[in-house]
Image (cartoon, rainbow, N blue to C red):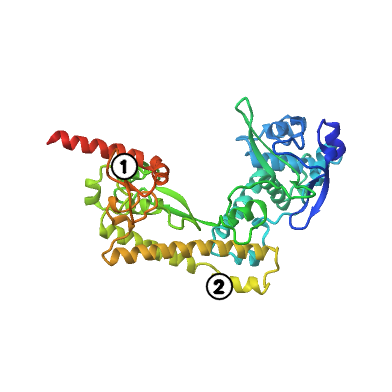
Amino acid sequence: MESWLKESGAVGLDDLQLANFQVTGRGVSSLQYYKEGERVLTIPCGILWTVEHAYADPLLGPALRSVQPPLTVEDTLATYILFVRSRKSGYNGLRSHVTALPTSYSSSIFFTENELDVCAGTSLYTVTKQLKRQIEEDYAGLVARIFGQYQDLFPLDKFTIEDYKRALSTVWSRGMDFVLPDGNSIRLFCGCNMGHIFFRVFINYGPLPNNRLLRLYGFVLSSNPNDSYDLVLSTHPTAPFWEQKQKLWISAGLDSTCTISLTLTDPLPKNVLRYLRIQRLDESDLSVMQVDATDGIVNESNEVEVLQFLVDSFCGLLENFGTQLEMLEEQLAASVHPPGGNAWAAAHVSLGEQRVLRLARKRAEDLLAAAESGRGSRGDLSPLARCANCDKVSGPFMLCGRCKAVVYCTRTCQVVHYKEHKVVCRVTNTASKNCVEMK
């Protein structure tokens, strides 16, 4: 592959070498130090794996163009990879690249049932089950639409469902989307990670939770600070007063179906409460609800109903986990699941999601206890008795100079909250002026 890259005009290869890293496996290390922003490797765009290049191929292109509607980006690139790998001659440079790609992946779609059962109850478990079914359906569609139609190009013994899954994993784990200067976008993929022989430098995947890291990239981080649980809130259009509530959800920046991430740092986001307060509005509440007033409680009965629902829901979600948190911790400490293996990774996903849900349940329980005791939850304190951003209840506070309806404990909280508050601020300020004019 190195010779092909050099012949194609790649620059920078002489300062790089293949290496095996203890944790991440095969990759590339550098033979010199690089300054921040310095170019490490330049590869001509003409040899990148893109949908455009797949369609331009003299053999593959006509087959792809015959399929209507066109294949997805992922399926096109996966087909391109398998097509090049299956060729007995030609495509020497591309085939050398395919040879350099991993022969196996640790994505959750390759887990055995027993390995996946370790994280039963997690979003990863549910998504993986759905993804496996979707892959089977998509593969059957490819066989019917293109593989079976052009068997001379796509011999089915080299285009099996397992081959398709590996090709998809290549696209998912190594694919990168780029926006070009002309406004078009392309997706391409690379063959390995980048590192340094003296210090390690890797692709920055961003603040991703373990459930996504494992599904997309095949690894997890112990005690991942970005662990989260995706809570799905949904209301059917046939529910009472759905259209009125939909308008309120939209005004609050939500929708009738929302996925809200619960995190270790914010286990019960305000948007969860906002959504459920609107969902449980009755006819009398809706008749007086003119703007989105769900930053605080609507009334005591609505708030208690919302919080009790959350406590019950979180308890139910936690009971659905196949192995409870304490048992998982004991199993990991005793190396029941070999470190680095699939079951070990699944256990870490389950640990992370259970920790987030337990924090969310505790938060909801505390708010419910406060509401039922008569002291009220944070939301039913007067807006002038708590910081509108962080909910701090001890002063001194600064009053919003425009609407004079909320307070902040610091200037920082006011700045952070402004994007969320500005619409309500304008409405409140206008309403106040109208009241004055009417007197």
Snapshot quadrant of residue 336: bottom right
Q: Is residue 320 left or right of residue 199?
A: left
Q: Is residue 286 left or right of residue 117?
A: left
Instruction: Indicate the position of residue 382 as horizontal and vertical percent values.
Output: 27, 53
Question: Which quadrant of the rendered structure holds the N terminus?
Answer: top right
Q: Is residue 428 left or right of residue 85?
A: left
Residue 368, compared with residue 236, is above or below; it is below
Question: Which quadrant of the rendered structure holds the C terminus?
Answer: top left
Q: Under tag 2, what secondary structure?
A: helix
Q: Under tag 1, what secondary structure?
A: loop
Disc 2: which residue = 326
Q: Residue at x 60, y 51 (%)?
A: 134
Residue 351, compared with residue 407, is above or below; it is below
Residue at the front extreme of this rendering: 396
Q: Nearer the viewer, residue 184 or 58?
A: 184
Q: Can you see residue 90?
A: no
Disc 1: which residue = 400
Mark 1 or mark 2: whose residue is earlier in sequence: 2
